[in-house]
Image (tube, rainbow, N blue to C red):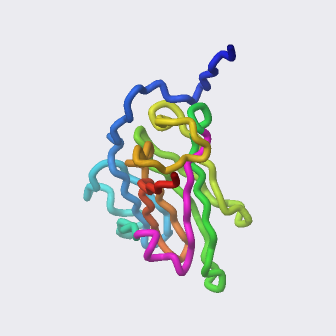
Amino acid sequence: MQEQKFGIKRSRETTKPKAECPEIHFYQCGNCKSMVQIMGYPTNEFKYCCNSTIKELVPINVAEIKEKVLIDYRIVGGYNDNAIEVSWEIVDKKNHERMEWIYIKTFTGGQIKYAVNTLKNSFLFALADEDAYVYCDEDPCLECTFRCKRGFTIFAYLKNGGLIRIPIERMKASW
C-alpha cells in the first residue's frame, strides 16, 4: 500500500474558507504615476503624492477590454501543489500596450507579480494554507459547481488600458 503524501503547501482545512480579506483599492498619483494599494475602506487621509492628488483607479471588467488584451486563468496542481496560472495575449500591439503587473486577491491576502520580462505572457501564483483549499485533486481544475476559488479576484494593470478586474468564479460543466 502506497503512503499518501501531504505537501507543505497543502490546505488542512476541512471546509471552504470564507473570503474575509478586506477589499483592495488601487490609487495612482497624477504627477509621478506612482501607484498605491490600500486594503479596507478608502479614506480621505491619504490623498496627496508629489503635491498632487492621487486618484482611485476604477477597475473595468475584462470583457470591456478584449480588443486590447485577452486574459485567462486556470487552477492547477491539485491537493499538494495548488496554484493559479494567469496568462494574457496583447491584441493591441500597434499602440504599444503591455502588461505592467498582476495582483491576485485570495482568501487570506494577496500576491503581486510585475511583468518585467516583456516576452513573458503568463504568471504562476503558488497557493498555500487556506488559499490552497480544493475539493478534489484534478489537475487542471474541472471548474465544477464547487468553485473552490470563488472569492478570489485577479487585478491586471495595462500600461495604456488601466486596471482590469477578473473575478475567479468561472464554472463549466465539462462532463
In the rendered view, tell whether residue 37 sits above or below residue 118.
above
In the rendered view, tell whether residue 118 sits above or below residue 167.
below
Q: Nearer the viewer, residue 60 or 73?
A: 73
Q: Is residue 74 visible?
A: yes
- What residue is rendered at 36% in x and 49% in y? 39
Name the residue furthest bottom: 94
Q: Is residue 54 visible?
A: no
Query: Which quarter of the image is occupied by the N terminus?
Result: top right
Compared across the picture, whether 139 is left or right of 40 comes to right
| 157 is within the stretch colored magenta | no
Point out the stretch of residues depicted in magenta.
61-77
Compared across the picture, whether 173 is left or right of 54 comes to right
- What residue is rendered at 39% in x and 67% in y? 59
Whole-percent x and y of residue 161? 50, 75
Whole-percent x and y of residue 116? 67, 60
Compared across the picture, whether 80 is left or right of 117 comes to left
- What residue is rendered at 47% in x and 54% in y? 173
Whole-percent x and y of residue 142? 53, 48
| 73 is within the stretch colored magenta | yes
Q: Nearer the viewer, residue 39 or 60?
A: 60
